[in-house]
């Protein structure tokens, strides 16, 4: 289909119910099947983090771990952080297995047992190394500049957020997936045409081997500057029509055009500054010192308390960040439709993705508010129809 800007040709969007009663029933049944693991794992993690952080249990564990290597502050900061991650990882393993069993039963997971354990261990190692590094850096700062540590820690936190966001696609993502450039052909030509039309410089469109884990479809854009790339899951290439993949890619181009990764990272950086400020206040409270049996922000045993406060902040900030994310996603949807002028393909895409990924077709507003980073499927379908109605005139 060609887009003629003078006389826009807008394909009709079928005004059918979006999903069959069977599809609604299946979505509901899956939601019911996943809710127990979802909420018990969340609750277990929160309880564990709070018990470790707001009671002497965490500082005792951190102290014991540090003693394995002499008990100095560096050993305590590093090994204490690792010990906390080990405990939380071990607590999470049963839930991961439970989640995997459900996904297997519903035909979503294609992971081998070996890959499941690789993923779990890799996630633990990456998280553990990062948390240990943050712990070491944090106590190095609080001990070097006891009077001004929040300023220095805030600046380092912001730098870390940007470095991680920049490095994510070139360091972390390749640890989990293999990427190849999308091969020449009709699809690549269509996507490059779209990229040209959008004015976004695209180094490459990559395909990831997501099918080794899942049957679900997806695409994303990550990195910025020289590490920016659009990634299509190989499942998407296999399952979707060219026009549908084009509408997905156009959405991703919308993110690239508006520099959403950079802005998202900046929002993360602002969140980090606020977090460090609240952390500095909380770590000055004697009531928390005595609850956690620590002497203050210079005491590396306080890493458990640090984690608990960070978790509270994350839980409070999550819904705010998600609301921001949903707005960004809606804007990318709008950009994508302005680019392809093909809302019918958008409707087809959301239907296919929703059914294939067993998405929640009727999410509770509270679930959306707390957890959704993307607009719910019904909202995205309505958006496509609204676009079609507005552009038919
Ligand atoms: Zn998006």
Image (tube, rainbow, N blue to C red):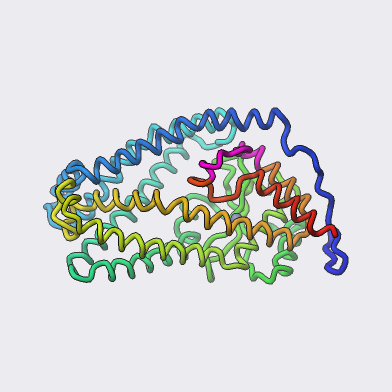
Q: Nearer the viewer, residue 63 or 55?
A: 55
x and y, in percent, of residue 116 in the image? 46, 38
Q: Is residue 246 above or below residue 90?
A: below
Residue 361 magenta-drawn? yes
What residue do we see at 34% from left, 56% from top? 130
Query: On the rendered image, what quadrant is the N terminus found in?
Result: bottom right
Is residue 374 visible from the viewing direction of this image?
A: yes
The residue shown at (24%, 43%) is 52
The correct choice, above or below, for 47 with respect to 190 in the image is above
In this rendering, position of residue 136 left or right of residue 299: right
Q: Residue drawn at (38%, 68%), measured in percent from left and top? A: 159
114 in the magenta segment:
no
The picture quadrant where one finds residue 161 is: bottom left
Residue 233, above or below 331: above
* Left-right relation of 261 to 162: right
Which stretch appears magenta? 354-368
Image-quadrant location for residue 342: bottom right
């Amino acid at each position: 289909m060609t887009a003629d800007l003078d006389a826009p040709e807008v394909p009709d969007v079928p005004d059918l119910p979006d999903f069959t009663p069977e599809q609604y029933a299946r979505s509901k049944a899956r939601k019911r099947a996943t809710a127990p693991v979802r909420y018990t794992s969340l609750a277990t993690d929160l309880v564990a983090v709070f018990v470790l952080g707001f009671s002497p249990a965490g500082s005792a564990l951190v102290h014991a771990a540090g003693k394995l290597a002499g008990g100095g502050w560096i050993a305590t900061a590093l090994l204490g952080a690792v010990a906390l991650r080990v405990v939380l990882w071990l607590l999470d393993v049963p839930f991961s297995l439970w989640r995997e069993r459900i996904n297997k039963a519903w035909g979503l997971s294609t992971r081998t047992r070996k890959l499941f354990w690789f993923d779990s261990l890799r996630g633990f190692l990456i998280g553990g190394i990062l948390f240990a590094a943050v712990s070491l850096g944090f106590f190095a700062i609080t001990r070097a500049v006891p009077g001004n540590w929040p300023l220095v820690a805030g600046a380092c936190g912001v730098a870390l957020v940007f470095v991680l966001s920049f490095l994510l696609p070139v360091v972390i993502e390749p640890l989990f997936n293999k990427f190849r450039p999308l091969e020449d052909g009709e699809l690549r030509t269509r996507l490059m045409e779209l990229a040209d039309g959008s004015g976004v410089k695209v180094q490459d469109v990559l395909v990831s081997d997501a099918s080794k884990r899942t049957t679900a479809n997806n695409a994303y854009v990550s990195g910025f500057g020289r590490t920016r790339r659009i990634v299509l899951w190989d499942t998407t290439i296999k399952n979707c029509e060219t026009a549908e993949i084009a509408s997905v890619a156009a959405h991703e181009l919308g993110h690239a055009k508006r520099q959403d990764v950079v802005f998202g990272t900046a929002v993360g950086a602002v969140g980090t500054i606020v977090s460090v400020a609240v952390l500095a206040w909380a770590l000055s409270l004697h009531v928390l010192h005595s609850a956690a049996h620590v002497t203050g922000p210079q005491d590396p045993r306080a890493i458990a308390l640090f984690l608990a406060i960070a978790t509270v902040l994350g839980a409070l900030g999550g819904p705010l960040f998600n609301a921001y994310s949903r707005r960004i996603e809606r804007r990318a949807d709008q950009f994508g439709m302005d680019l392809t002028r093909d809302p019918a393909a958008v409707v087809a895409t959301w239907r296919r993705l929703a059914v294939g990924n067993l998405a929640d077709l009727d999410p509770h507003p509270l679930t959306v508010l707390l957890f959704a980073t993307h607009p719910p499927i019904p909202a995205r379908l309505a958006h496509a129809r609204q676009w079609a109605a507005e552009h038919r005139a």
